[in-house]
Amino acid sequence: MNPLYFTVTDTDGTKHTAELGVDEEQIDTVDLAPGEIITGTVTGKGTFTPKYVTYSDGLLGDSLRADVK
């Protein structure tokens, strides 16, 4: 898990890259075993309303998407 692999998509469909070092609860860089869970904050630069967050495992890896609540 690497915070650099996150993007935030806003309600207009624009993608924002994760901005590091902004929130002290930023999601950590960790290795997760199957079934392990981690929580943390993903922050994007600028003013926008987030719709969902996408995690892509490297350049060619699988992507996972979660709605922002």
Image (tube, grey):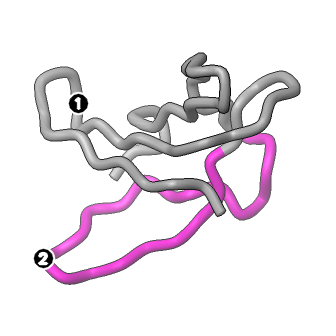
Residue type indicated by callout 2: Pro
Residue range (magenta): 21-42
**Which is more toward the observer, 63 or 34?**
63
Measured Cα–Cα span from mark 2 to mark 1: 18 Å
Total tally of numbered discs in the picture: 2
Q: Position of residue 47 (x, y in %)?
A: 87, 26
SS type, badge 2: loop
Q: Is residue 24 left or right of residue 67?
A: right
Q: Is residue 40 above or below residue 29?
A: below
Q: Which residue is mark 1?
A: 58
Classify 10 Å Cα crowding around label 1: few (below 14), some (14-19), many (20 and above).
few
Q: Residue at x 84, y 22 (%)?
A: 46
Q: Which residue is mark 2?
A: 34
31 in the magenta segment: yes
SS type, badge 1: loop
- Based on the displayed image, in which of its 4 quarters is residue 25 positioned? bottom right
